[in-house]
Structures are given as structure tokens and as C-alpha cells.
């Protein structure tokens, strides 16, 4: 499913032409009420070690019982990623670490619940999905003293509240070809996960964690390079930086005639570089084998079908709907911004009110998105917003006025007429503006003669006069058009 | 850990016949009936058993812990219920021994391992709850081979249990403490666990009835795991009827165990008293004639088959070819699962910890000192079997053998209702006889392992005496959920057993 090479990938090579091959593994914590194999609350930010029981502490004799809600969420994620839901089994992944109460993790291995699939980026490019499987989260260790790593620590604290929290791990094909595309992939995946209701999408709380496999190869080469796995990226920004750094590092090694070693590398956010954690030889042998304490997970056809039927609208469909309404391509930046911020309903409101959906889209993608930044809520009512678009469209407000009104409505809500009058904006229809233009021309005959004679420098003079005459309520673009057409007629 | 072969600590002989008196000689169902009707007091029954424990436990060492005070409190509760006209349940006042790998809330549960030193589970195993709710009185935690790995109860951090029939000999294992407790009259019933024969083999060696139920019939919640896909909890009793009574109390679906079978369990006692007329009984040729089956055991099996035929059953020899590979497959699968199940004993959270310079050293020191030799041997075996590159050749292949065994059994059960086989190749052996030769010890389970691999029920019933007057057990095997017919045949064997079979102290005892 390899897509076309993104030009940005060439940045990696610093001189030579290299292309990046990137695959991502995204761990998504599921928003279940309880943990994956026991009844403990699945809750973030509590006192350490309060949400624990014999099962999630792995006490001798305890046994796991699979959480049905987690399976439902996993099926939703699979459906949203066009995966095949199949009869699956759980495996044990064995390794010693104090944050794992049983010293093995219950995960899915060669027979995951969701196999295959794809995700469509806003650009229209499809990234292949290898699998989306269920597994349990580990606890959280804090190493105190030393370098913050377990072997030099004075002591380590373990919080098992997170142990046994349900995860779905989504593994992509190595179809991603730039740091920017990797970010787009994670953003799109996050939007999908939130849309399914399976995740809150909070990267900062660790609800979404990304590991990344990066390799580089000469541009156009068919043969894949040796890859490195990068861990410890805590934000989209660090994901982008880590990939750019790692690709450049590998390109440099190869350009100098060296060889990339297959290994796991740790991203150091402060230093802005990756460094080796363990080589392939040091890699753990996880001794996977089927988890004997759980039975085959075979969701019924009816269950899978009902999940698909009730999935709701995914971001790509929303983008297509918004794009169709506004008459722009689905891949346009404005469309993806509006959908990313969850503002598509307001485009719908404009359509319902027979307002200009394209204008609505521009206002949302520019002014509203600008006000909201990366998140946060707004107070725009559907009808109020649609009405504002209509007012601007009819010339009852200038575009500058409409933008000012909109900003206030985003912050405070309210009706556009009321906000406009509070700001002293008068409704100035097309006829009223024409009258003002006539007045200004009549009052300045000499200047008009020069303007009419082709002296465009006087445009500013007339616009200034019109602005003053209307107390700033004029649509200046419309005014200059009136001036031009009057000159053409004279 | 293991004591040398030889005389008992105090140089005394077997637990004498005369010592089983009063309620210690009674069946569980008679005790329960007496307590329920008010003819017996649960406390009185308990005190008689505690006296027996006090007298003989120093010789036998069936228990890692005797919970006398808690037992007295529980017995008083049972008596109080009866006094108020309430029914304490089908095991009212029956003293029960619990293998020390069944979690008991607030009561140390050690698996006879140093590594669990000091650990008190915060919860009760489902079976522990069930027997308590049925009115039983838990008298203590029974000794066992460490983490249920062994066939003699010599691999115990607290020292070996001795066979009540001959204190120089082992009681079998790994549930040797449970079997010995029932044989010595310390309790009327006991619970054990059977992964490859750990209930049936000690039952045979101690001359009591021991049952490994269908996999999934009894909840494993709260059973400290050895090999999860093979482990099953089951009862010991001095009679077939008592074992059925206990099994019917502990069986049934448990939502805390995902491998627990759904629906109503078959009642083990449902076909008792019907005789065996017309039943089809197959004697498994490969096990009856297996290498290492001693002549006395072979003779007892013949006798058992003949007695069933005499009672109207149709008895034939049957071949179940793949059972020959059972032992090899078992010693891949069980250690593999154990290597993973026992990973959690790492010194981080509970139990024993040996300090180290860093986490890796701490892990290594803790596990090196905390586990005994046999456990370490099996962890290494299992770790190796699961290693990358070896999985298919070892674990994968063993799982295929398992499938074959199930297929061969299914085919046998298309023509037979139950199958017969020896339980243990020999009668109880002397302490120390096999501790230096792990493979010889492993062969003790050659006849019992196939049922675990298949997930089918099987039980051992005393049938005659062998070398040195020691008890011999005959094994009855049945298809999945075939407990009723299995008990039906076991009851017939019990009734037909040669004189002296039910005598728990051997011909030598005067």
C-alpha cells in the first residue's frame, strides 16, 4: 500500500536524496469504566495504588476475565479502520519489569481481533493498517535518583492504577513517508478514535502513545533500509522532531558509507536526539505462548454487524460532506481544519439556513479556528452562526464587521444582530452604500475627475471618505467596486 | 529440604488402626448428617480431629499450618446455626484439609515454597468459599510439593509428608499432605489440585479416593497456578460417596474463571447405587502394560476389571495409542506454562526478597534462593521450550500430541463408557528413593497425565494391597463431564475391593 513519496522526505538526507519509510504503533487507552480483566475503575490521576485488586496486581491464584466493553471498543476501532474482525486469541508476552505485576503482559500476537485495514489521511492518501489488537497496560514506574533509569535509581516507585487498563495497539504498514505525514496520521487516527467513543485522545495524559519505526532508503529504491524503533515521544511535536532527527541520523550514517544497526532508540526531548536503548541482540525474547487462562475471543457476526451499523460518522466522511456542501475539494486545508475542530455541524447549520456554505467554511476555518487554537470550546449557536453568514452575504455586515461579531460570538455566544448593534455596527445594505458613494463623489468633484481620468492613487482617498461617512460600517471591498463601476460608466 | 529415607522422626510405626476412632473414622456424609440433625456437634467433631492431629501430625507432617483457633470459631458458628434451626449445608461440621496452594483470606498460603514466605492472600479461592458456605470446617493448609511440582511431597520447603501407612514412605504428590490428612483421620475430606496426577497418585499411595474432575468443572480462581491449562482442583475422601459429595459442593460455573464451564454441572453422585450392569469398560492397553508397572499393581488392575465384569459390565482391552506420548508432551507444556506463571515471584511486591545491587541482581538472588531445585529445573525447562526458534519444535509439537490424545480418547469413548488404568505404577516408595533421579520421579505420573492433557475426569479408587501391604489405586477415566458414570463405576470397584482395602493402616499394623 506504499503511497507516493512526499517531497518533504528528501529533507532527511541533507544533500543526498533519501526517502523515509515510517510505520507507527499507536497505543490507545480505551475509555472503559473498568479495567481489561477485572472490575477496578479505569481512571486517570487518582492517588497511587488505589484502583487495584488481586487480578490487576497479579496476585497468586487470580485469573483474568475479559471486559466486554473493551471488546466493543476494539471492534469499533477495527470497523473505523476498515479491518476484518476475526476470531482471536490472547498470548502472554513474558518479560521482567516491576511495572508488570505478573511479569508478563496479556496481549494478542498472531491472531489479533482486527486484521488489516486502512486509514485515509485528509490528503486522500491511504495508510495501510496491519492490525489493531487488544492488550493490557502496565503500571507506571518512577525512578528516583540516578539518571531516572531503573538501573541507576536510588529507588523506584510503582503505581499499579494503570496496570490492566485496556489498550488497543494499532500498527500501521510502513506507508508513511515524512515526519509531517506521521503527524497527520496520528492526528487522523486520534480523530477516528475519539469519533468511535473508544478514546479520549489525550496524548498529554498518555491515553495515546506512539512508537515509531523509521528507516531510510535511496530515493526510488525498492529495497527497504534497516529500521530503528523510537520510543518515548510524548507529543505530536516530539514525534515530528524525533522522526526528522532519526531519518537524518540514518541518512548521515549511510552517506558516510556506514550501516544502520537495527535497534530500539530512546527519544530525548531535552537534547533533541535519539540514543540507543538496546540492540537487536539484546532484544527481549518474549516467549509468546497462548494465554491459557482466557478462551478464544470470537465476536459473533451479529455483534460485528451491529458495531458497524452503529459506528457513527468518521472524520473522512465528515470531510467529504463538508467539502461537498462548500463546493471545495475534500483534501482542502479548510475542510480538514473544520472537521478536526469538530465544527462541521456549523457548516451544516449554514446549509440548513440556505446560507453560503463556502463562506461559512472560510469563517470557521479562519476566524473560528484562529480563536480556538488547538482546542477549547466555543459558544456559537447553530442558528446564530448561520444567521451571521446570511447577514454578511446580504451585505448587512461588512466582512470586517462580520469577523468582529464572530469573534465575540465564539467567546460569549449571542445573536449576531445584538452583537453587531452592541459594537455600533449598522446594517448598511447595498442601496445605502451606493448613496454614500454618490454623496462623497458629489462633495469632491475635482478628485473624482482625476480618479475618473485613471489616477488610481485616489482610490484610497475615496475609500477613506466613505469609511468616515459610514462610521466604519461600509463594506470597503464593495465600496471600491462601486467606485470602479461608476468610473467605467462615466 | 527432603529427609533421608528411614524411620519417622520419633521412630514410630504407621498411624495405628485403633487410632481412627469416633468421628475420625466416620464418613463425611455421616458427620454432616449428624451435625445437621444435632446428634453431633461440629466442635466435638473438630476436637476429635484436632486430637488426632496433635497425636500424629509430628510423624506425618501433613500440614504446613493447622488453623485450630479459626476452625474452632467456625465449628461454633456451625453449631450455632443448627441451634437456631438453620441448615449449615451439606458439609455441616465436616473437617476439611486445604492444599496450601488454595488462597485463604488472611491465612498464609505458601505453596510449600520459601518464596511466598509471609504472604497472606487478601481473598479466598472460590472452592474455599464454597466448602465454607456448605458448612465445612477448614482445619489447616496441607503440605505439598513446592508449587505442585513433584510426586512425593518431598520437594517442600517445610519438609516431606510421610505416608500414614508406612512412615518411611512417601505419600505421593504433589497433594501428599491432603491425601495423608484424609488417610490419617486428620480430616474427613481434603482438597488438592491435579496437574498431571497430583490428586490421583497420592490418593493411590495413601489408600484413599482422589478425583481429578473435568477441566473447567471446578473454578480455579484462587488456586495458585502451576500449569493453567492442566490444573484442576478436586477432592479426597475415604469413600467414593464422600468424594462425590465434596465434588458436588465445589463444582459449578464461576464468572471469575474464564475457563470455567457454563451451565449446570453434572452431579457426581447422581448415578451412585445403580451398579454397572451393561456398562462398557475399556482397559487401556498402553497403560496397563506400560514399562515400570509393578506386578502387584498389574494384578490389582486385573482384579478390578474382573470384578466389574462379574458385576455385569462388558470389559475389554482397548488401545489408546497416543497416551504413550503423554509424558513427553506434558513435560513441555506444564513447565512452559509454569515458567510464565511463576515469573511474578520476583521479590518486588510480596513474599520473599533477597537484596541485590540493582533490580536484576535482586530478581536473580530472590529467585535463586526462594525457589527449590525442582521448581528451578522446571522453570528452566519451560523457558527453554518457549524460546524463539524452539517454540514450534517443543511447545507447538506438544500441543499437537495433546490434540492426538483427545482424538484417541474420543474414539475410545465411542465404544466405552469409562476406561480403566493403573493410577501409580507402584505402591508408595521410600523417602529419598527418587529425589536424585528426576526422570524416575516423573514416571510416577505416566498413567495419570493423559487425562490432564485431554481435560477429562479421572479418579483413583483403592483396590487391594500390594508389596509390603501398601495400598494400590485403580484409575477410572471418563469423557468430559462424565463424572456421574465415573463415580458409578468407582463405587462398584469400592464395593468389590478385596478385604482390607478400606483399612487405612496396612496389613502390618496390628
Image (tube, coloured by chain):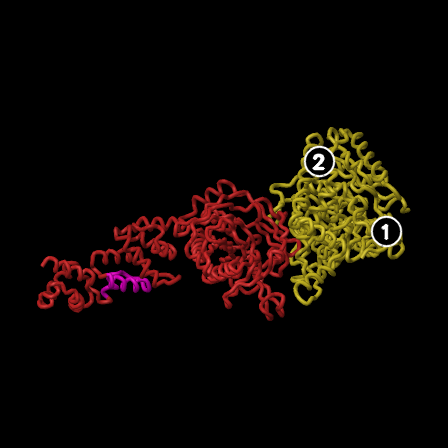
The residue that disc 1 covers is: B167
* CA neighbours of label 2 inside 10 A, class few (<14), some (14 to 19), many (20+): many
* Residue B201 falls within the magenta-colored stretch: no
Query: What's the chain of the residue with tag 2?
Result: B
Give the class, few, some or many, for how many residues have Cα within 10 Å of label 1's Cα (few <14, many ≥20).
many
Q: Is residue B195 above or below residue A258?
A: above
Q: Quadrant of residue B287?
A: top right
Residue B18 visible (yes or no)? no
Q: Whole-percent x and y of residue A139? A: 57, 60
Check the image and report above or below for A263 versus B481.
below
List x then y, in percent, for residue A129. Answer: 48, 48
Specify the subunit that label 1 lies on: B
Q: CA distance from mark 1 to mark 2?
A: 35 Å
The answer to whether B265 is drawn above or below residue A462 in the figure is: above
Chain ID, red in image: A
User: On the rendered structure, is B297 left or right of A296?
Assistant: right
Q: Nearer the viewer, residue B20 or B191?
A: B191
Judged by its main secondary structure, the magenta piece is: helix
- Give coordinates of residue B361: x percent, y percent: 69, 64
Image position of A334 (left or right of B459): left
Q: Which residues are magenta?
A: A399-421
Report which residue position mark 2 lands on: B485
Q: Is residue B377 left or right of residue B467?
A: left
- Chain B appears what colour? yellow
Give the camera-side residue of A131 and A270: A270
Going from N to C along the chain, the mark reached first, 1 or 2, is 1
What SS does tag 2 mark?
A: helix
Q: Quadrant of residue B406?
A: top right
Amino acid at each position: 500500500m506504499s503511497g507516493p513519496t512526499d517531497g518533504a522526505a528528501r529533507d532527511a538526507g541533507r544533500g543526498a536524496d533519501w526517502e523515509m519509510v515510517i510505520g507507527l504503533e499507536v497505543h490507545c487507552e480505551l475509555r472503559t469504566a473498568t479495567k481489561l480483566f477485572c472490575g477496578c475503575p479505569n481512571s486517570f490521576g487518582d492517588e497511587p495504588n488505589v484502583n487495584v485488586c488481586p487480578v490487576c496486581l497479579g496476585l497468586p491464584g487470580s485469573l483474568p476475565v475479559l471486559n466486554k466493553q473493551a471488546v466493543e471498543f476494539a471492534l469499533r476501532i477495527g470497523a473505523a479502520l476498515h479491518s476484518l474482525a476475526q476470531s482471536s486469541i490472547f498470548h502472554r508476552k513474558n518479560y521482567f519489569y516491576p511495572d508488570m505485576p505478573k511479569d508478563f503482559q496479556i496481549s494478542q500476537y498472531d491472531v489479533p481481533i482486527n486484521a488489516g485495514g486502512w486509514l485515509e489521511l485528509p490528503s486522500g492518501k491511504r495508510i495501510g493498517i496491519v492490525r489493531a489488537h487488544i492488550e493490557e497496560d502496565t503500571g507506571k514506574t518512577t525512578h528516583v535518583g540516578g539518571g531516572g533509569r531503573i538501573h541507576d535509581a536510588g529507588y523506584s516507585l510503582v503505581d499499579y492504577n494503570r496496570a490492566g487498563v485496556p489498550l488497543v495497539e494499532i500498527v500501521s504498514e510502513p506507508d508513511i513517508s515524512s515526519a509531517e505525514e506521521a503527524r497527520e496520521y496520528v492526528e487522523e487516527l486520534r480523530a477516528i478514535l475519539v469519533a468511535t467513543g473508544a478514546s479520549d485522545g489525550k496524548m498529554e495524559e498518555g491515553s495515546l502513545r506512539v512508537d515509531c519505526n523509521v528507516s531510510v532508503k535511496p530515493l526510488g529504491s525498492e529495497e527497504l533500509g534497516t529500521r530503528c524503533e523510537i520510543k518515548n515521544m510524548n507529543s505530536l511535536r516530539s514525534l515530528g522532531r524525533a522522526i526528522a532527527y532519526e531519518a537524518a541520523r540514518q541518512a548521515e550514517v549511510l552517506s558516510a558509507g556506514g550501516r544502520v544497526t537495527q535497534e530500539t532508540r530512546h527519544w530525548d526531548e531535552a537534547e533533541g536526539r535519539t540514543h540507543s536503548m538496546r540492540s537487536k541482540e539484546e532484544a527481549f525474547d518474549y516467549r509468546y505462548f497462548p494465554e491459557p487462562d482466557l478462551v478464544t475471543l470470537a465476536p459473533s457476526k451479529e455483534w460485528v454487524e451491529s458495531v458497524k451499523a452503529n459506528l457513527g460518522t468518521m472524520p473522512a466522511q465528515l470531510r467529504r460532506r463538508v467539502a461537498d456542501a462548500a463546493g471545495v475539494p475534500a483534501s482542502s486545508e479548510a475542510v480538514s481544519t473544520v472537521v478536526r475542530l469538530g465544527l462541521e455541524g456549523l457548516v451544516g447549520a449554514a446549509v440548513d439556513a440556505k446560507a453560503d456554505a463556502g463562506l461559512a467554511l472560510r469563517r470557521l476555518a479562519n476566524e473560528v479556528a484562529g480563536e480556538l487554537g488547538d482546542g477549547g470550546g466555543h459558544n456559537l449557536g447553530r442558528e446564530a452562526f448561520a444567521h451571521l453568514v446570511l447577514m454578511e452575504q446580504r451585505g448587512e455586515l461588512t466582512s470586517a464587521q462580520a469577523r468582529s461579531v464572530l469573534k465575540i460570538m465564539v467567546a460569549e455566544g449571542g445573536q449576531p444582530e445584538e452583537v453587531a448593534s452592541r459594537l455600533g455596527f449598522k446594517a448598511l445594505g447595498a442601496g445605502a452604500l451606493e448613496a454614500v458613494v454618490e454623496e462623497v463623489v458629489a462633495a469632491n468633484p475635482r478628485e473624482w475627475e482625476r480618479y475618473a481620468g485613471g489616477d488610481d492613487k485616489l482610490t484610497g482617498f475615496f475609500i477613506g471618505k466613505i469609511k468616515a461617512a459610514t462610521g466604519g460600517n461600509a463594506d470597503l471591498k464593495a465600496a471600491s467596486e462601486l467606485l470602479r463601476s461608476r468610473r467605467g460608466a462615466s | 529440604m527432603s529427609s533421608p529415607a528411614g524411620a519417622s522422626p520419633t521412630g514410630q510405626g504407621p498411624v495405628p488402626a485403633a487410632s481412627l476412632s469416633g468421628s475420625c473414622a466416620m464418613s463425611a456424609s455421616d458427620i454432616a448428617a449428624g451435625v445437621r440433625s444435632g446428634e453431633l456437634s461440629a466442635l466435638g467433631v473438630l476436637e476429635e480431629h484436632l486430637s488426632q492431629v496433635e497425636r500424629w501430625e509430628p510423624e506425618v507432617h501433613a500440614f504446613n499450618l493447622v488453623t485450630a483457633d479459626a476452625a474452632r470459631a467456625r465449628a461454633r458458628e456451625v453449631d450455632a446455626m443448627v441451634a437456631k434451626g438453620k441448615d449449615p449445608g451439606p458439609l455441616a461440621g465436616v473437617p476439611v484439609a486445604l492444599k496450601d496452594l488454595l488462597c485463604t483470606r488472611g491465612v498464609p498460603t505458601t505453596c510449600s515454597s520459601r518464596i511466598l514466605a509471609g504472604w497472606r492472600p487478601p481473598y479466598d479461592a472460590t472452592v474455599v468459599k464454597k466448602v465454607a458456605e456448605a458448612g465445612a470446617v477448614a482445619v489447616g493448609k496441607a503440605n505439598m510439593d513446592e508449587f505442585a511440582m513433584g510426586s512425593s511431597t518431598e520437594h517442600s520447603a517445610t519438609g516431606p509428608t510421610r505416608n500414614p501407612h508406612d512412615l518411611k514412605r512417601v505419600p505421593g504428590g504433589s497433594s501428599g499432605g491432603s491425601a495423608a490428612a484424609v488417610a490419617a483421620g486428620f480430616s474427613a475430606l481434603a482438597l488438592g489440585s491435579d496437574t498431571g496426577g497430583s490428586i490421583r497418585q497420592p490418593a493411590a499411595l495413601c489408600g484413599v479416593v482422589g478425583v481429578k474432575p473435568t477441566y473447567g468443572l471446578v473454578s480455579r480462581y484462587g488456586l495458585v497456578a502451576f500449569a493453567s491449562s492442566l490444573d484442576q482442583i478436586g477432592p479426597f475422601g475415604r469413600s467414593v460417596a464422600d468424594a462425590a459429595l465434596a465434588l458436588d459442593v465445589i463444582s459449578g460455573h464461576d464468572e471469575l474463571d474464564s475457563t470455567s464451564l457454563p451451565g449446570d454441572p453434572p452431579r457426581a453422585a447422581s448415578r451412585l447405587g445403580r451398579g454397572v450392569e451393561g456398562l462398557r469398560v475399556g482397559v487401556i492397553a498402553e497403560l496397563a502394560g506400560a514399562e515400570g508397572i509393578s506386578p502387584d499393581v498389574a494384578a490389582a488392575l486385573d482384579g478390578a476389571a474382573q470384578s466389574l465384569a462379574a458385576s455385569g459390565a462388558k470389559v475389554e482391552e482397548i488401545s489408546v495409542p497416543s497416551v504413550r506420548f503423554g509424558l513427553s508432551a506434558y513435560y513441555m507444556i506444564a513447565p512452559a506454562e509454569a515458567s510464565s506463571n511463576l515469573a511474578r515471584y520476583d521479590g518486588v511486591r510480596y513474599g520473599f526478597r533477597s537484596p541485590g545491587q540493582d533490580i536484576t541482581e535482586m530478581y536473580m538472588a530472590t529467585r535463586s534462593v526462594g525457589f527449590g531445585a525442582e521448581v528451578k529445573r522446571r522453570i528452566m525447562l519451560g523457558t527453554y521450550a518457549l524460546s524463539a526458534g524452539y517454540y514450534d519444535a517443543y511447545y507447538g509439537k506438544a500441543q499437537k500430541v495433546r490434540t492426538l490424545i483427545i482424538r484417541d480418547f474420543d474414539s475410545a469413548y465411542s465404544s466405552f463408557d469409562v476406561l480403566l488404568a493403573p493410577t501409580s505404577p507402584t505402591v508408595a516408595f521410600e523417602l529419598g528413593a527418587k529425589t536424585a533421579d528426576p526422570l524416575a520421579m516423573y514416571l510416577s505420573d505416566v498413567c495419570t497425565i493423559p487425562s490432564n492433557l485431554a481435560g477429562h475426569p479421572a479418579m483413583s479408587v483403592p483396590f487391594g494391597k500390594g508389596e509390603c501391604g501398601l495400598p494400590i489405586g485403580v484409575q477410572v477415566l471418563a469423557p468430559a463431564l462424565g463424572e456421574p458414570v465415573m463415580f458409578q463405576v468407582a463405587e462398584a470397584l469400592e464395593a468389590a475391593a478385596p478385604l482390607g482395602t478400606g483399612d487405612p493402616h496396612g496389613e502390618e499394623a496390628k
